[in-house]
Structures are given as C-alpha cells and as structure tokens.
Image (spheres, grey):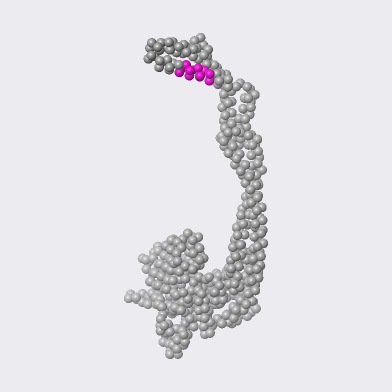
C-alpha cells in the first residue's frame, strides 16, 4: 500500500506530499492543474525513463519518493530478498534526476537498476492509463482472473510447483544427456589411451630409475675400474692402507700403559681403520651391483623408449604425471557409467511427474471451463452498467503444451458493437473502454487475488450519469480489498472516495505557477463536487445534488 508520495522539483511541482488512505482515493481538479504531472512523477519510481526537461530549478536535483507499507506483501518481500535488498515493513522507493541529467534509483537507500526497479514496483503499483494493454499481452492475467473466479488459486499454485519441479528434472535430464553425448564421443579414444597406459604398467618413478640404470650400465667398465682401484688401495696393495692403519693402532696401544695421554690418538686411528674397512666392503658391494648383462640393458632400453613415447604423446614430464593421467582417465570413464545410471533414474522420475502434471492440468482446465459461462454473463452485465450496453465479452480457451499456468491458452475477446465479430480485447477496446473492462474484471476477482495499489487514470472518460455512478460503485467495492487511486472528472465517481484530493495551481510571490494538492474536508468536498456538476458558481440544486451524492 502506498502510504506517502513526495515530489520535489518536478515540472511545475515545487514540493508536494500526498498521503492516500487504504481504500478509494479520488483525485479531481481542473484540466491542466497537474494531475497528469503527478502521474508522470509516480511513473519515475515505477521505472520509467527520466527526462531532464522536468527540472524546474536547474540548480537542484528532482526527487520522487514513494513510501510503501509492505508488511503483508509476501511476494514483494521475497523479491527483495532475492535481490539482496533490505527487507523491512516499510519500503522506500526513490528516484533522483541530477542537474546533469543523470538518473539514479534507490530501494531502501540501496542503488538499483531500472530493470530491477520496474520488476519490484510492478508488485506494488498497477497503473491503468488509457491505451495501457500490457496486462493482456500474456496469459497470466486472464488465467489468474479465471482461477480467482473458479476458486482454483490453490490448485493452480500446487500445479505451478509441480510444473517447476518437472522443469528442473527435465533440465537435469537434458544436461546429463548432453554430457553423455559429449563423453560418448570421447569415450572410445579415452579407453584406448587408458588401455595403453594400463598395458605399459609403469611403477612410481620407473622411467627415471630405468634411465639412471641404463646410464650406469653404459659406463660399467669405467665404474668398475674406479671402484676396484679404490678398494685395492685400501685392502690389496703392497702396503694396504687398512693393514698399515691396523699396525699403527697396535703399536700405539702397546705404549698406552707408559704414556696414557696417547690413548685418544690410538682411539681415533682405530676409528679411522674401522671406517676405511667398512668403506672397502661397500666399494666391493657396489662393484658387484654393476651389471653388464646385454639382455637387461635391452629391456631397460625398451622400457625407456616406451616411457618417452608416452611422455611425449601426453605432454608429460615424469612417470608420476603419466600415472595421474591414468587415474583421471579411469575416473572419467567411470563417470560415463555413472551418468548413464543418472539418466535412467531421471527419465523414470520425469515420466512419473509428467503424468501427475498432466492430471493436475486437466483438473485445473475443467474447473476453469466450468465457470467461464457465468464469468462471461457477469462481465456483460457489468459492461452494461458502466456505459457499454452494446459490448459483448467472451472468453476463448485452447489446449496447449504444459506451461507454468497449465495447458490452457486463454484470451479475452470483445465485440464492441454487437457486430458478431469478436476480437482480442486489447485490439477491440479503446483506452477508456479498456480501463472500464479491467475495472469490471478486477471487481469480480478482488476478494481472491492479491493486487497491488490500483491507479485508474480517468477510467470514466466518455461516460456520465448512471454509467459513471456504476463505475464509482465498482471502484468503491474494489477498494474494500485493495488500495485504489482514481483520477476522475465525474462527480458520481469523486463522491465515492474515502479520501478526496484536489489538485490546483497557485502562483507564488513572483507570479510563478506551481501545482498544489490538498485533502478536501466535508464542506470543501461538497463544494468541489457541486462545481463538477454546475460550474464555478454552482446553484443550490447542484450543491444539493453534491450532498446527495456524497451521502
């Protein structure tokens, strides 16, 4: 619900504050007083494009703010949460046009794009201007109206949840099938690569170790020669180093009893002797490890050749990378099997839900078709009352593929002059007729549908007398369930308002005109309505008529 609208520095509005009540707010005033300008300012916070020509004072920015009570608007609060905006009981929508012409929009002081602003405010305000046929461009309005009349709103919501669940599963199934198709194209080649690696059966660091072993075998003669020469010096020469150190150790030990201080030297030489003896043994061991077997060399050469071939083929550098690739291929091929199982499971689930979806759609369609004759009858009765006695309303329903609204394609039709030729409502009705038809439809669905603030711009254009009175009655009934704001030139409509705003122009001390708005009290309201009936100087009869209308 719109609690307050504040407009500053917009067209001929210097500063204006409007606080409508929760029911029917009527707005009257002379032509050119600024009623359309107020609507233009309101359109800014609904996401319309800005125009710098609206700036009165070129040195100050133009600001339009709307304060909305959204405490009971769960759909809007959900939209705020999804947009990651502050969610409070009161929502403040603000639009600013700077002196440079730059426009900015804010929701609860957070900057937003015009697209998001338009999406959010469509859940707060429904502006019916002449030639505004947008509500009928899609099936949703027609379907929601029929669901409200047939009391199938709950069933429609149940169906909608099932539809989106089916859509989600269907999308998952399509994604998995696409993945399966892509993987299937690559599966044979991946299997070939995996088989090649499995057959090679490389162990950790095998290629690197084999390469090192081959290098050693290629230099076996020189390696053995060096090892043998070193061992010979230590153990086999004319004066083997190990033997000489042993002899020195024995001689030093023989004098330790008379020269105790020599014992540390004896111990060190003994330690060196033991270490060199151990080294000689290890040299012999390493010498025995060196192979000269041509068969072993050939085998190593083949393994290295195979390893280098696979390394080059896969752009790898080490045995570890080849083994990692082998594991990855195994996992991918296993995933191919997993996706096959997932597709089978999803296909069964999709089929079962689709059957349930079709069953609910058929039940929903049957309920809608049942109320269509009565709906058409009521609308035609109301059209006669609101000044369209020659118009005939009809509903066309066709079966289509399942969508979020069921399997029904619903169109509202109109024969404006009993010609027997029905056309789409949005093509057959004029601007004023469209507003009245929408008023009739919404008055029938008011109790069942959650509607935002409804604004009607001159819904009574082209009618008077009883038709205008009936429009006022419908607006009043509609306002029992929703906030309604109506700009009108008809006294029969103005008199039905629970709050009456009067728009006028006033000159300041410099003679500059600006638009003003005031809430009319009882006597002021009667006088304003009397002037709508009898002119600027209303007669006693006009005043009496105004009192009767208000009462």
Residue under the point 44% across and 74% down: 20
Q: Which residues are magenta?
A: 271-282
**Magenta stretch secondary structure, dominant:** helix
Q: Is residue 431 visible?
A: no
- Quadrant location of residue 265? top left
Residue 547 location, x and y as percent?
45, 86
Q: Nearer the viewer, residue 100 or 484?
A: 484
Residue 60 location, x and y as percent?
37, 66
Q: Is residue 271 visible?
A: yes
- Quadrant location of residue 15? bottom left
Q: Is residue 388 magenta?
A: no
Left or right: 230 as drawn, with respect to 139 = left
Residue under the point 46% across and 79% down: 498
Left or right: 61 as drawn, with respect to 427 = left
- Name, please, the residue furthest toward the front: 257
Residue 168 location, x and y as percent?
60, 58
Q: Nearer the viewer, residue 79 or 397?
A: 79
- Name, please, the residue furthest toward the top: 238
Q: Nearer the viewer, residue 528 or 33?
A: 528
Residue under the point 45% across and 11% down: 250
Q: Is residue 183 above or below residue 353?
A: above
Residue under the point 44% across and 79% down: 500
């Amino acid at each position: 619900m719109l609690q307050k609208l504040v407009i500053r520095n917009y067209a001929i509005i210097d500063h204006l504050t409007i606080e409508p009540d929760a029911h029917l707010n009527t707005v009257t005033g002379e032509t050119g007083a600024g009623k359309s300008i107020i609507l233009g300012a309101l359109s800014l916070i609904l996401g319309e494009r800005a125009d710098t020509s609206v700036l009165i004072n070129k040195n100050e920015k133009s600001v339009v703010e709307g304060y909305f009570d959204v405490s009971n608007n769960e759909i809007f609060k959900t939209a705020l949460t999804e947009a990651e905006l502050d969610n409070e009981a009161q929502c403040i929508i603000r639009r600013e046009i700077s002196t440079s012409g730059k426009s900015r929009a804010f929701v609860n002081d957070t900057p937003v794009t015009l697209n998001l602003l338009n999406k959010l405010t469509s859940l707060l305000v429904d502006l019916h201007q002449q030639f505004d046929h947008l509500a009928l461009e899609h099936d949703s309005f027609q379907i929601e109206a029929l669901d409200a009349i047939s009391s199938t709103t709950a069933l429609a919501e149940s169906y909608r949840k099932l539809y989106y669940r089916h859509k989600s599963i269907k999308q998952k199934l399509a994604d998995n099938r696409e993945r399966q198709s892509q993987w299937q194209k690559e599966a044979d080649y991946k299997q070939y690569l995996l088989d090649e690696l499995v057959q090679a059966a490389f162990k950790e660091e095998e290629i690197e170790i084999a390469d090192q072993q081959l290098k050693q075998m290629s230099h076996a003669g020189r390696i053995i020669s060096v090892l043998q020469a070193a061992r010979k010096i230590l153990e086999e020469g004319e004066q083997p180093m190990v033997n000489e150190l042993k002899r020195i150790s024995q001689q030093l030990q023989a004098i330790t009893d008379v020269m105790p201080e020599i014992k540390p030297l004896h111990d060190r030489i003994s330690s060196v002797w033991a270490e060199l003896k151990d080294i000689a043994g290890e040299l012999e061991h390493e010498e025995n490890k060196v192979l000269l077997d041509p068969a072993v060399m050939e085998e190593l050469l083949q393994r290295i050749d195979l390893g280098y071939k696979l390394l080059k083929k896969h752009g790898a550098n080490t045995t570890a990378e080849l083994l990692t690739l082998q594991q990855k291929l195994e996992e991918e091929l296993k995933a191919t099997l997993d996706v096959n199982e997932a597709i089978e499971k999803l296909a069964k689930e999709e089929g079962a839900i689709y059957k349930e979806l079709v069953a609910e759609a058929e039940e929903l369609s049957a309920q809608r078709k049942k109320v269509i004759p009565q709906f058409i009858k009521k609308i035609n009765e109301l059209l006669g009352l609101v000044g369209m006695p020659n118009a005939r309303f009809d509903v066309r329903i066709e079966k289509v593929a399942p969508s979020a609204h069921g399997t029904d394609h619903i169109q509202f039709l109109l024969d404006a002059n009993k010609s027997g030729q029905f056309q789409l409502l949005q093509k057959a009705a004029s601007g004023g007729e469209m507003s009245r038809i929408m008023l009739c439809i919404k008055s029938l669905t008011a109790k069942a549908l959650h509607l935002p603030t409804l604004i009607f711009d001159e819904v009574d254009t082209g009618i008077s007398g009883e038709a205008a009175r009936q429009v006022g009655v419908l607006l009043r009934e509609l306002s029992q369930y929703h906030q309604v704001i109506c700009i009108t030139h008809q006294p029969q409509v103005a008199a039905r308002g629970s709050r009456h705003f009067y728009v006028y122009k006033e000159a300041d001390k410099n003679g500059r005109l600006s638009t003003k708005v005031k809430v009319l009290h009882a006597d002021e309201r009667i006088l304003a309505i009397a002037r709508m009936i009898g002119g600027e100087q209303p007669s006693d009869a006009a005043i009496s008529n105004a009192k009767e209308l208000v009462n």
